[in-house]
Amino acid sequence: MKKVERINTIMRYINNRSHFTITEIMREFHISRSTAIRDIREIEALGMPLVAEVGRDGGYSVMHNSILPVVRFTDTEIKALFIAFMATRNAQLPYLKSRQSLAEKLLGLISKNQQDDLVLLDEILLFEGTNPHNPDLLELSDLPHPMLEKLIQNLLLDNYLWITLEEGEEINSYPIFLLHLYHEKSLWLMEAYDLQEEKKKLFTVDQLTQVEPYSPKKRMSRKKILELLGKQEEEMNLVLELGPYAIAQYKKYHPLKAFISYTNPYQTTAMLKMFVQVNQRDEITETINWLLFLGEDFKFRKVPEEIIEALRHRGKEIEQTVKAR
């Protein structure tokens, strides 16, 4: 561990304790006594208010009611933070309004040379979803649905929620236990257990009009919910054997519920399993589009007849389009 990184790590260690000794620092960071003493002196010089305690069991403690020093970042850590900001542009993430203040604070912590490095990185690096004509770190054009942050705030308190959704021309409310909140195909989705119908459902945050805590007199436990879900788990009805090209395509994009297990140590072949709701036309269409995206480097091991029929129909449509040209 480099000296600067060690100093920063020791400072965080000290901040989390009311009292520490040189011996504890030596043991925790595997350094000599002389190195530990030098590091403590350097930390004091940086402004951390330490009080030395004399005696056989003496040590150090952080002075109460004192301002602790500003957190310092290494060059590598600054670049890592900046690139993380860049990579999340246009990702419709929550709390995005804080991105500008975070970026300004980050830029205010670093030197002019470090700022120049970040400007150069911003000009060179492009990520998926980035506008190459306006790759601005402080751009706020990718704000998520306004209900997302409210949903997360409630989730931090409890997974049991009462949600109200605008579904077509109807307004419906559901008591749910929220299992997962995830982002897929430019939408934030809520995977939830409907506590009234006692089954798993999928809702979009875009439909959400209200969310509030749900506190019934008799609450079903999380353990019980997971047990019920385990019994209701759908059988995988689409199983594919993937080759290296199809695996590479899978890594570029795949539905959240499609997962693979590698079948050789070189990860060049794999089995893919997922459940497709064949009674939903939109899901059939999305599945067909994704199978075509995988290419020809896969074999069906198990497939619903509805998928096969839809693929045949898509093939005829493509053939007719080609002939028309």
Image: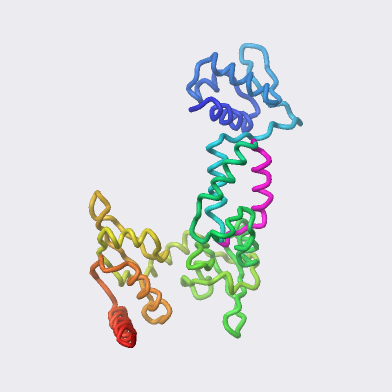
Residue 217 appears in the figure? no
| Above or below for 253 versus 48 | below
Q: Residue 72's spot in the image, x, y percent? A: 62, 34
In-image side of 202 versus 13 (left or right): left
| Residue 133 vs residue 41, the one in the foreground | 133
Colour scheme employed for the rendering of this structure: rainbow
- For the C terminus, the image quarter is bottom left
Q: Give the residue displayed 76% in from the left and 31% down from the top.
A: 65
| Residue 135 vs residue 276, the one in the foreground | 135
User: Which SS does the magenta portion mostly show?
Assistant: helix
Q: Residue 203's spot in the image, x, y percent? A: 53, 72
In-image side of 319 versus 148 (left or right): left
- Magenta-span inclusion, residue 103: yes
Q: Residue 101's spot in the image, x, y percent? A: 69, 50
In-image side of 123 versus 300 (left or right): right
In-image side of 179 versus 148 (left or right): left
Q: Give the residue displayed 53% in from the left and 47% down from the top.
A: 83
Q: Residue 6's spot in the image, x, y percent? A: 54, 27
- Residue at far right of view: 65
Find residue 254 and report its image quarter.
bottom left
Q: Which residues are magenta?
A: 91-111
Find residue 246 and report its image quarter.
bottom left
Residue 86 appears in the figure? yes
- Magenta-span inclusion, residue 262: no
Q: Give the residue displayed 50% in from the left and 54% down from the top.
A: 126
- Figure disc tally: 0
